[in-house]
Image (cartoon, helix red, strand yellow):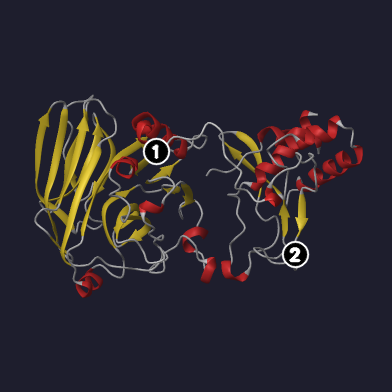
Amino acid sequence: MFERFRIACIMACAVIITSAIQIGMSADAQELGIKEITFDERIVGFAVLKGEREITRITFGSVNNIYAEKVRRSKSNGMRKWRFGPLRSTTAPKLSGDSYVTVMIKGDDPYPQVWFRIGIRRFDRERWEREMGRVPFHFLVCSMPDAKLFHQRGWVIPTPALDSYPLHNEARGYGRQIVSNWSRNWTYAPPIGAYPLATVGLWDPDSGRYIAYDFHAARLIDHTEKDIASAYCWQFKSTREFFTLVYPYGRGYQQLRYPKNGDVIASHFHLLYSFTMTSDNDPNLFVHEFVWARYREYLPSVPIVNDLSWLPQRYRLSAFPKLSVGRLFHRLSEKEARWFKAGALVQRGVNWDGDPVGYIYETGQESIIKQLKQDIEFLLQPQYARRMVINGDECYYWQWPLEGEGIDMFGPGVPTMHNIWGWKVALAMLDVYRH
């Protein structure tokens, strides 16, 4: 048992999670470049290349329904530009003649800027639903087949390639989060202005590939991004696994809405990418480092000393709480069944602020140490400690909850290995092993 305990302590970790379209080749093997994508002799998007390596493709519409009549290339003061326009649509809506997408690369900047303006001259709802279905108006589509995670507003959301529950669950009412109300294949479409992190993209930790639209320049400089939304789609007609910009944002984020005649959608973003974003990396850190390097002078300052005088008295500490260790798991009573059904077994672990395990050893609390070891032995039973091999390493982790299901509004399938609680169990084990 203790050998398995040793392995689990050391290795405990979470499971992290040619067609009719043609593309031109890059002339310079070292230079970042843009090449148009054509379909039926129409320019339907562009590819971003580094030498002859394709970074990603972005299409103006999801099913080649938006195209550019031409592309105009220019270069001035180290800035290369590709202006695609005027944009046209093969279905609804009818676009204004000044609709365009411009891609700009400045010097050796690895991240292209994309500026766009889409004017809605007329939106024919009946034609749109007849030819496209009951889906939102969407544009600037980026597909990454087999991407495991959708990165939106700072959240890392599993796609069905990793976990089917977030998008394809049977939740209802308040339990239906993230997924849209128009399709189980689409997430909701919140406005970028409401995102703590103004970024949307896809991430595949297995390959290390990450692609995102970053709107922080727009947020900090002109705030043109605020009413534009984004969404992820698992499958729409012939196109799979893509993220896209959406307009307008969903009512209540989940309800379908359409553009109005005369609407103008205009903003800009940086196209961020990485080929080394493996599971031990963090896309939020990647984005924060980009924003800090580029736009720190636009960020609000912070006070030298935090002013917490506004806190009501009951929330103020009169003394620091003593460190303690409770049980590592708990079976829920009827009164406690707010998220999981009564009888569900949930793990608790130990907190990661402070060193509660170290404290009970240093203060010689033998009865608590004994109970802690018994709890660890219980959690190491095969039905709870799930064994897996990751990159050749023997690892263990714990499902959340250990037993039981979510309450009815969440539907079946709530138990998941993709949770933070297993880390708190692993932390308890590591600290006991350390002592």
Q: Which residue is mark 2?
A: 343
Q: Is 5 placed above or below 116 here?
A: above
Dot 1 surroundings within 10 Å: few (below 14), some, or many (20 or more)? some
Q: x, y (%) of residue 219?
A: 33, 44
Q: CA distance from mark 1 to mark 2?
A: 41 Å
Identity, as a three-letter code, of the amino acid under mark 1:
Arg
Q: x, y (%) of residue 307?
A: 57, 40
Quarter location, residue 122: bottom left
Q: Is 168 placed above or below 147 here?
A: below
In the picture, measured across the screen, residue 406 lies left or right of residue 370, that is left
Quarter of the figure with the C terminus: top right
In the picture, measured across the screen, residue 148 lies left or right of residue 53, that is right
Q: x, y (%) of residue 102?
A: 17, 43
Residue at left offset 29%, top offset 41%: 221
Quarter location, residue 127: bottom left
Dot 2 surroundings within 10 Å: few (below 14), some, or many (20 or more)? some
Quarter location, residue 408: bottom right
Residues at circles 1 and 2 in contact by the CB criterion of under 8 Å: no
Using the rendered image of the protein, determine whether residue 80 is visible from the camera's viewpoint: yes
Q: Which residue is mark 1?
A: 209
Q: Is 151 placed above or below 283 here?
A: below
Closer to us: 299 or 268: 299
Closer to us: 234 or 298: 298
Identity, as a three-letter code, of the amino acid under mark 2:
Gly
Where disc 2 sits, the SS reads: loop
Quarter of the figure with the N terminus: top right
Q: Which mark is residue 86?
A: none
